[in-house]
Amino acid sequence: MIVGIAGGSGSGKSTVAKKIIDELSQNYSVNYLQQDSYYIDRSHLSVTDREIINFDHPDAIDFKLFIHQINQLRTNNVIEMPNYNFQTHTRNSKTTIINPGKIIIVEGILIFNRVEFRDLFDYKIYVETSDDIRFIRRLKRDILDRGRTVDMVIKQYFETVRPMHIEFVEPTKKYADIIVPEGGHNKKAMQMIIYSLSHQQVK
């Protein structure tokens, strides 16, 4: 079974994914793939040219490889998942070996944007969180984990993150099977999702 978890940057997608994994992995083998691992490698460009790329646009994602590797896992093949360096905007030379599992959790802001990707999912979840909360979370993450300054985060948010969210992310909410307000902090929604997924596996 393949579960897609979409939503805006900072909405809490990873928290939802991890809560599902924590519960389901007690009884099933679970794979976890993040869109963030599949940015197109930009090592052939100069640092200056990499800095001006719109990483929130669908064209920044290597969907061909992403879809291929999900299909490989689905047909019980091992994959080498790329590892992306957000400070240099390049792929690392080392990959991560992922073995096939019973359940595949796929998470990312743009995973419902393309029909060929949406068709992969047996279960689609959209995490909806208010813009101000999402921005604060992104601000903290990018400063602490990705070496950005406050000014850099604010500039990127207004130039690409916000407009791309409006154009490419939020409209995909209509494709979700379930919309989860406030993500992993919504205990009742998480209980329903985990119960549903568990019982589908039992069948």
Image (cartoon, helix red, strand yellow):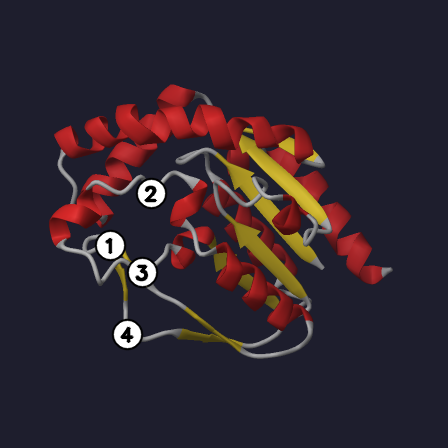
- Residue 177 in the figure: left or right of residue 187: right
Check whether the beta carbons of the residues at disc 3 and disc 1 lie within 8 A of each other.
Answer: no
Query: Disc 4 marks which amino acid?
Result: Ser
Q: Is residue 130 above or below residue 11?
A: above
Disc 2 element:
loop
Nearer-N-terminus badge (2/4): 2
Nearer-N-terminus badge (1/2): 2
Disc 4 element:
loop
Give the number of the mark in front: 3 or 1.
3
Using the numbered discs, state the Cα–Cα distance from disc 1 to disc 4 in whole angstroms.
13 Å
Which residue bears the numbered disc 3? 41
- Residue 9 in the figure: left or right of residue 144: right
Q: Determine which of the numbered discs, if any, sits on residue 28 in the image.
A: none
The image shows residue 120 at horizontal and vertical percentages of 68, 54
Residue at x-position 65% and y-position 44%: 115
Nearer-N-terminus badge (4/3): 3
Location of residue 62 (image quadrant): bottom left
Does any portion of residue 83 appear in the rendered image? yes
- 24 or 132: nearer the eye? 132
Which residue bears the numbered disc 2? 55
Query: Callout 2: 10 Å neighbours few (<14), some, many (20+)?
Result: some
- 19 or 147: nearer the eye? 147
Check whether the beta carbons of the residues at disc 1 and disc 2 lie within 8 A of each other.
Answer: yes
Query: Disc 3 marks which amino acid?
Result: Asp
Using the numbered discs, state the Cα–Cα distance from disc 2 to disc 4 in whole angstroms.
20 Å
Which residue bears the numbered disc 1? 89
The image shows residue 176 at horizontal and vertical percentages of 67, 35
